[in-house]
Image (cartoon, grey):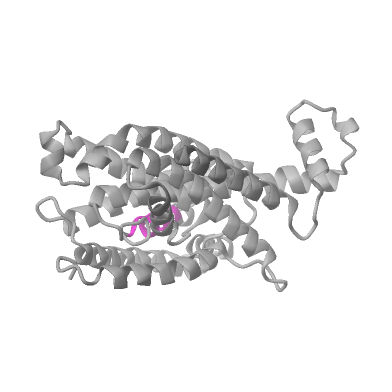
Amino acid sequence: MRKYALMALLFAAALLLAALSVRLGVAEIGSEKILKVILSELGFLPMEAAGVSDHERAIVWHIRIPRMLTGAFVGASLALSGAMLQGLFRNPMASPVVVGVSTGGALGATSAIALGLGAASLWAVPLSAFVGALVTVLLVSLVASHKGHTPLGALILCGMAMNSIAGALTTLVLSYSVSDFEIARQILFWLMGSLTNRTWEHVILIAPFFAASGVAAAFFGRELNLMMSGEESAMALGVDTARAKAWILVIAAAAAGAAVAVAGVVGFVGLLVPHIVRMLAGPDHRRLLPLSMVVGAVFVMGMDLLARTLSPAGEIRLGVLSASIGGPFFLYLIVKNRARAETF
């Protein structure tokens, strides 16, 4: 009963934040008008009968709803990636940012932008981000793991090294792109993380990756549970650990890479959200993975709403807000786990 009550509460929070994200902004639009716009755009209500101005229709349907959906998909994807990486590495410090996946995805995306691939194909940027994220997480996993274990210190150090390498390469790409203002501006956008000017195209870009990652992750909840007690124990219970690890890495990289492709680097969502869900619902990945997606969507939609409304001087970058919350939480985790002898 408690599990269903928690799920109902989280879904209610997601719906509430979605409604607030569409309603609030520089121009506040009433709930009745928002409902009329949605019904008319979906064909359930004649547009001439909706009684909504073209300006209000454009704000709701072409600006705020795509931005809200993109934020929800980004948060859910990053939280799913973080939950899977933490389960795979059996380590609470693993996340798309800490292990360098987000930075690797940003490198792939910015490289595609600098080469002009984004203008040639709608899928070039997210696919490049996916490749960058996958390569990064594979390298970190290979270097940090020893005899089937991933010590906390090794994970942090390898992630820091990969972040530095990917960050340096991204800066190199940017330095060669400064002569083209538009390309340089787009690259800086990915580095700061934002949902500004997100459109239905961005929703279409991330939705297939999110849907495929979420469905695929559902098949690995049991394997992640068994692997938490060690690969040897999981193998004894019939788990093909090599196959499971490969698929989990691909799913985590696809989810994080797609999020980076449409929103840039939004830090610490994948670190923070799984911990919150684990405290609320326990460590069972069959519940942890779907609930992490819901809480991740709520978190990013909430942060984006604050980014749009918190400062009267202008919009705050989403990556700045998420890092301001996730950074202190990351330090808390380091202090909490520093007594473990195997860590350092």
Between 217 and 144, the one lying in front of the other is 217
Relative to 213, 35 lies left or right:
right
List x then y, in percent, for residue 324: 49, 70
Quadrant occupied by the C terminus: bottom left
Is residue 74 visible to the viewer in this orientation of the structure?
Answer: no
Q: Where 153 falls versus 101 (above or below)?
A: below
Between 282 and 273, the one lying in front of the other is 282
Kindly identify the residue that appears in the image at 44 percent across and 47 percent down.
Answer: 292
Majority SS type along the magenta span: helix
Between 49 and 3, the one lying in front of the other is 3
Count of labels shown? 0
List x then y, in percent, for residue 54: 85, 43
Start and end of the magenta stretch?
100-109
List x then y, in percent, for residue 171: 41, 68
Relative to 34, 130 lies left or right:
left
Q: Is residue 198 magenta?
A: no
List x then y, in percent, for residue 278: 38, 51
Relative to 149, 174 lies left or right:
right
Is residue 38 visible to the viewer in this orientation of the structure?
Answer: yes
